[in-house]
Image (tube, rainbow, N blue to C red):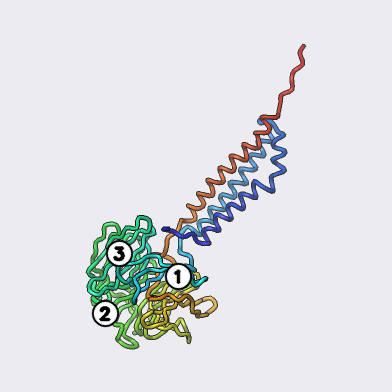
Amino acid sequence: MKTLLSQSSLSVVVLFSVICGRVFADPLQGEVLKFEQLPLNNGLARKRIRQILARVWGIVGIMVVFASCFAVGRAQAETLYATANGGYSEIDQVDTVTNSVTTYLNTPAPPDSVMFDSSGDVIYSTVTVGNGQVVKYDPITMASTTLASGLTNAADMVLEPGGNSMLISDYGSGTIERINNLTFPVVTPLASGLGNPEGLAYVGNKLFANIGYRYGGATGKEVAQIDPVTGAILATSPGLNSLDGLTYDSYSGLLYASSLFGNLVYSIDPNNLNNVQIATGTGIVPGPDGITSDGLGNIFIASSDSVGDSHIYQLDLINNTLTQDTLVNGLDDLAPASGGGSVPEPSGFVLLGLGVFAFRVRLRKFLKGCFKTEVSTRQEPRRPRI
């Protein structure tokens, strides 16, 4: 399947169905009985129809406003997608509630990073040194398309705001490359001389990247704001320890970066990169690599299989807790759980459209039923013969 139905969008359909059911079931049953006793041209009957339609379309208007809150799809927070390498070559679907792991896709080479495009196709990078690739996989046709190849060491990716292009960090060559068209890909360099670039994240139209050298010590890397057009570095954070993954959390309005050898996660203010805190406090995440946010106050962190314990950790920003969740063998990175690159779903308006269609069918049957008995049973009184 290309899409997942989130609980928020499902609630739109359920609530719409419940309200429509109440309109036609309990409150108006008595009215239906009265309806069947009225002639078609009776003024009271027409008044009843107008009252029902006014109530119905009032509900539709309310539901349109309600559904607009969910017009932008997102993946379910409980369901994550993870890359597994280090002896594995697969992308896994992970349920962090039941702690179950299912192989979603076997890849021809060990994958490093994974995300989804706006149509639901899977995009992943491979870590084959000297011939790193970016591959797009269509889960419906099961066809794979190579978007880029020959990368020194393909690493983290980000879908750009327009949804038609993406960026890829080439860890080995110190560059960030742009793939300009995901249907007919054209690869162009954006920035170079970045050391070992890894995590990438957009905050609106602002681009951020983890740059510097992984083995440069406690201050060897930094979060940089990069001009997405020229590739120029606009601002940098203080030197930080072995930055790897990077994500933006819309709930807190902060960037979160994992420190592979520091066993912690930093929070960084995208409006002031000098404002850096240790988000995990005294908690320890062994070898954190990939990181993502669900936008609801939860940060999910992949403890690297190579230097960590291969578990997904959950940082609850609301309750300020850090929890070890699911074990994923070969764990490396996590797909975005919200925003660009996450699993798309039908928008609230699409789901509402289905509800309106079902509602119209129900309305037609209701009105037809109101007059069917009336037409078949009512007889005009005979005029006496003179």
The residue under the point 46% across, 60% down is: 4
The residue under the point 48% across, 65% down is: 76
Report x, y in % for residue 331. 39, 75
Q: Secondary structure at mark 2?
A: loop
Q: Is residue 270 left or right of residue 16?
A: left
- Front position in the image: 85 or 193: 85
Residue 289 quadrant:
bottom left
Q: Give the labeled residue for mark 1.
A: 101
- Separation (CA) of disc 2 from disc 1: 35 Å
Residue 227 shows in the view: no
Residue type, mark 1 in image: Val
Q: Earlier along the polypeptide chain: callout 1 or callout 3?
A: 1
Mark 1, Cα crowd under 10 Å, few <14 / some 14-19 / many 20+, is: some
Mark 2, Cα crowd under 10 Å, few <14 / some 14-19 / many 20+, is: many
Residue type, mark 2 in image: Gly
Residue type, mark 3 in image: Val
Q: Earlier along the polypeptide chain: callout 2 or callout 3?
A: 3
- Separation (CA) of disc 1 from disc 3: 23 Å
* Tag 2 and tag 3, C-beta contact below 8 Å: no
